Amino acid sequence: MTSPKINIKALTLVELKALLAELGCKPFRAGQLFAWIYSKGAQSFDEMTDIAKSERMLLGSRFSVASLSLLRQELSSDGTRKFLFGLEDGHTVESVLIPEDDRRTLCISSQVGCAQACRFCITGGGGFQRNLRAYEIADQIVVVEKVLAGGRKYSPETRSITNIVLMGMGEPLANFDEVVKALAIITNEPGLGFSTRRVTLSTAGLVPEIGKLGRSGVKVNLAVSLNATTDEVRDRIMPVNKRYPIKELLAACRHFPLEPRRRITFEYVMLSKVNDSPEDALRLTRLLRGIKAKINLIPYNPSPGSEFKRPADATVKRFQQILQDNEYTALVRESRGRDIAAACGQLREREAGAEK
Ligand code: SF4
């Protein structure tokens, strides 16, 4: 009986090297294969034309180059593009491409669903199904880049995607080991080779894992989804706060090792009459004192049936002004792609609804 083929993308470079050595392949072959798969988006061994045909056949008999299947994509009037992927077990995940000035940021998912149950989030409302494997996380980038290239050859220097954020479905730090493995593929060469300055991991605030990430030597940017300035409000909108209250979360942020000139981004989804008062803004300035921080204010993007409302523009402006008066960098970031339901989990939700 022949043994099933191994998905080459499920292997780290070290694991692949070991397996190739058993097959009698040259030691540099693993790096070459990684470059073909991640930097040039090859989906079969036939495309790897600088490897002898006999060796390609040998590799093809032992390994597969499985990819996420792109089920659907939508383009918003503001240029945001949303991609829905099918996984081998029938689950789906999504990524969102956000063009802005000379950047094209891809927001990728780290889990199918999410257990954190943030009240303002559609993904949270649907519960948790499973963790993504490292290759399922990294492959979102490979497939989207291939779509954007439209058949044109590309390299890390000429590819379209410039920035990566782990801010799609799921809590990345709840899938710690696979996310760290994926980050190695995303930031290493051979691999996708993104600069660590251009990769951001966003967490709802898993305190022990923030410490673990800091100690791991992974140097990507950290973003924290804060969204409240009192435990009473944060407990209500983000259940994770009952385990790790604001004080503990910010203590972990204070201890997080930052590279020179980097800051932690605090995401603050503004919910009308919940967390958007001038007192909240002032409290926020006091809470973040001593942390190298910048703040993204995100006026809530209500979805059908949602219990929260978007604050008035004047309320957002006043909140931002208070932060700026206290010397904080505070940007207002609009939710993008409203007409294609680009808030995390919305396309997937709609697809599931259509399938029912
Ligand atoms: S906001 Fe993020 S952490 Fe919270 S439920 Fe949604 S996906 Fe999970």
Image (spheres, rainbow, N blue to C red):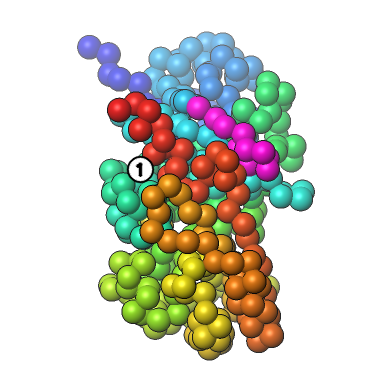
- In magenta segment, residue 75: yes
Residue in view at x 52 percent, y 11 percent: 54
Q: Which residue is mark 1?
A: 112
**x then y, percent, for residue 313:** 63, 66
Placement of 236 over or under 116, stated as above or below: below
Q: Quadrant of the C terminus?
A: top left
Question: For ligand 1, which image quadrant applies?
Answer: bottom left
Q: Position of residue 82 (x, y in %)?
A: 55, 37
Label 1 amino acid? Val
Range of residues picked out in magenta: 72-81
Query: What is the quadrant of residue 73 in the picture?
Result: top right
The secondary element bearing badge 1 is classed as strand
Q: x, y (%) of residue 354?
A: 38, 28
| Residue 207 placement: quadrant | bottom left
Asked whether residue 301 is in view, the answer is yes
- Quick one: 228 or 249, which is closer to the camera? 228
